Amino acid sequence: MKQHAVYPNLFSPLDLGFTSIKNRVLMGSMHTGLEEADDGFPRLAEYFAERARGGVGMMITGGISPNMEGGFGAKLSTPEEAKDHRLVTSAVHAVDPDIKICMQILHAGPLAGTSSCVAPSAIPSRIARMVPNELDETGVQKQIDDHVQCTKMAQLAGYDGVEIIGSAGYLLSTFLVEKTNQRDDQWGGSYENRMRFPLEIMRRCRAEVGENFILIFRIAAMDMLQGGMSWDEVVLLAKEMEKAGATIISTHFTWHESTVPTIATMVPRAAFAGVTGRLRKEIKIPTITSNRINMPDVAEQVLVDGHADIVSMARPMLADAELVNKAFEGREDEINTCIACNQACLDHTFGGKSVSCLVNPRAAHETLLNYRITASPKKIAVIGAGPAGMSYATVAAQRGHHVSLFDAATEIGGQFNLAKQIPGKEEFYETLRYYKRMLEIHKVDVRLNTTVSAEQLKQDDFDHVVVATGITPRTPEIEGIDHPSVVSYIDVIRGNCEVGQRVAVMGAGGIGFDVSELIMHSGVSGALDRDVFAKEWGIDFENHPRGGVTGVKPEIAKADREVYLLQRKSSPVGRGLGKTTGWTHRISLAQRGVKMLNGLEYHKIDDQGLHISTDGMPEILEVDTVIICAGQLPKRSLFDEVTTMGMSATLVGGAFEASELDAKAAISQASYLAADI
Ligand code: FAD
Ligand code: NAP
Ligand code: SF4
């Protein structure tokens, strides 16, 4: 087979002896929520088939429990349940029998969240509600048997293999770590004993399924726990897994209860691949690496550096099902890049909602949202080229409508041009690149520096007007709001105003947090530099103390400022941020010394500073700058004008609703509306 000119490693097959994988790209396991839904399996089948058509070499399903006690989701233990899975495996193999689809077996152990949850010892996880039931000898044997039965049923269902998760704080990993395994029988005590449970599962599964079935073990190569696994323990486990019959070792980099971000957008691309690389040198079977590998050049470099044999790109495959084909065909500028926001994927999973993707609302909704060619093309004007306007214009034009996109600004992107300037949010540049290319490809007539009037739109004879003019920042009604010390977040982010040494940020929503991060930042963004990131979060990649973090003190470069981040609500500051990333922002600001105050009232702003009170106790924050981040109001006067003139019009994004607005809502709403016109 001829080598690929740009990605020779990525597009080389991997020989597993009894079979081979056609390229080195894996879609790693992600729970979608469809696994449990009534109409879930037909939807899952289409979700996986779309990614199979997109060129991926191997895919792993979301976690499936081997029994009732292991699950917060679907279970597989009977031939009846295996029938559902047949839909998925048949759909994938119908696209290309060479594409591998494996099922992840996930026994959540103490994280199952039910009263029947089990663990080696009755020790609750920091993040779980339940104290797990300690397994007795019969219970341990049952869990092993159930893993074997689940693997057998996965084989019956037509999967090419299974991945058994042995990380993240789920059952298998709790046997490995002393903190969660306090047993003194053959399953606890020495490391040899603590490894016995996962190794026994691997041995028994191999014996059950024969040689020609892929068995992947997912290991916590760096569990990010104080007192977690040592490097020697990680290596020994991987070697023993190899002997026990594993085909591939997949590396994972966290337990859910860790307080170090490992997949959020502030994590540099491929930050953890080097850890896999070190493990790869110790074993003979192939390794998979993962985490923040979101573009083909990053994946290729990981392989060139010898860090892994297979690169897992999980969320990137939600963002763009065609990522692999686009890379193969030299269409990298058309890739819709995962920005690692977690807003529509992991936040949904942990919020009990079905998964999608902020930049691609079709993800896991392939049977519900389709961009079909229109039978009656319309002439459409879209006003405002923020996320809502860009999405609407792209989808409508893709469907064959004639679309003109107007924006008063000099560049497309709306508020994404502010977001991209926040340290740790550099991935927003990729979304802007993607939309620019989509607008070109679908021949949208983009008119920047242009404010159109309702009259003009009428004169130009548009069939439909889409008002996507976004928002106007809210100006709170406080005495002294026009004081010279008061500035807007827009001017601060754009660098249009001075910010003093002592600052009050009024409003602690997403933007208040981002602005505080920006003004407290100093030096290179950790997202762009692995050493800076490691220092900020106390990770020692070189020496790998236990968990990668034990005893390592974070070192933060920060601006010489005193910052107060303020809100009137009495709930903890930052409570409304994303479920799976909010804590990273709160820790980051706390480490930079930002003082977060809640439950307060604003009285006035004058030369002395910002006058507030908490529980009736007055106080003056002697600040020289007050940055207003107090939410937003819809900007929709154009809609009123065009509808008054009798034109057909739609409101989208912030212009439609500012209070619950974020980019996820804006892009999703615009895409659904444009799919339907
Ligand atoms: P906008 O992005 O505001 O776009 C409106 C566009 O309309 C602008 O380009 C404007 O120039 C144009 N316009 C306005 N009036 C006219 C007119 N009369 N004629 C022509 N053009 C006009 N959301 C998230 O989901 N996740 C995040 O991490 C995130 N981070 C953010 C960080 C920052 C610093 C900021 C400021 C916002 C962030 N957001 C985030 C919010 C997100 O960017 C907005 O929800 C989203 O941009 C709203 O999209 P929109 O298209 O409705 O409006
Ligand atoms: P927001 O989340 O609504 O927060 C606005 C803040 O202003 C609140 O803390 C509110 O708290 C305060 N406020 C509201 N009215 C006020 C008033 N009259 N006077 C003083 N304070 C007032 O809005 P945002 O921060 O502007 O963000 C806009 C959107 O972008 C949000 O939907 C957000 O989710 C999204 N975004 C997301 C991210 C992300 O990382 N996911 C980042 C940035 C932005 P009190 O009323 O309690 O004071
Ligand atoms: Fe990536 Fe955000 Fe989409 Fe999740 S929602 S796949 S993190 S872009």
Image (cartoon, grey):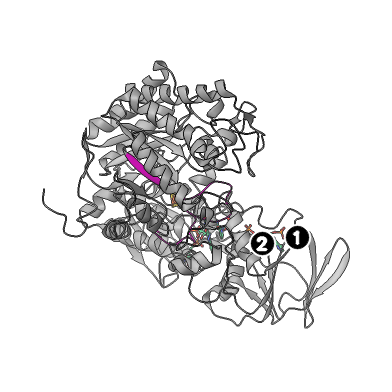
Q: Is residue 242 magenta?
A: no
**Quarter of the C terminus within the rendering:** top left
Residue type of the residue flagged with mark 1: Asn
The disc, 2 or 1, on the residue closer to the chain's N-terminal end is 2
Question: For numbered disc 1, what is the local secondary structure?
Answer: loop
Q: Is residue 251 magenta?
A: yes
Q: Which mark is residue 508?
A: 2
| Residue 394 relative to residue 327: left or right | right
Question: Does the magenta stretch mainly form a helix, a strand or a loop?
Answer: loop
| Residue 200 relative to residue 299: left or right | right
Q: From what the image shows, is residue 469 above or below residue 165?
A: below
Query: Does ligand 2 reach within 8 Å of label 1's beta carbon?
Result: yes
Picture quadrant where residue 507 is located: bottom right
Q: From what the image shows, is residue 120 above or below residue 489?
A: above
First to last magenta residue range: 248-270
Residue type of the residue flagged with mark 2: Ala
The residue under the point 39% across, 26% down is 204
Q: From what the image shows, is residue 495 above or below residue 372?
A: below
> Where is residue 571 shown, x and y percent of the image?
74, 53
The residue under the point 66% across, 53% down is 575
Q: Which mark is residue 297?
A: none
**Is residue 106 visible from the viewing direction of this image?**
no
Picture quadrant where residue 185 is located: top right
Question: For numbered disc 2, what is the local secondary structure?
Answer: loop
Mark 2, residues whose alpha carbon is within 10 Å: few (<14), some, or many (≥20)? Answer: many
Q: Which mark is residue 598?
A: 1
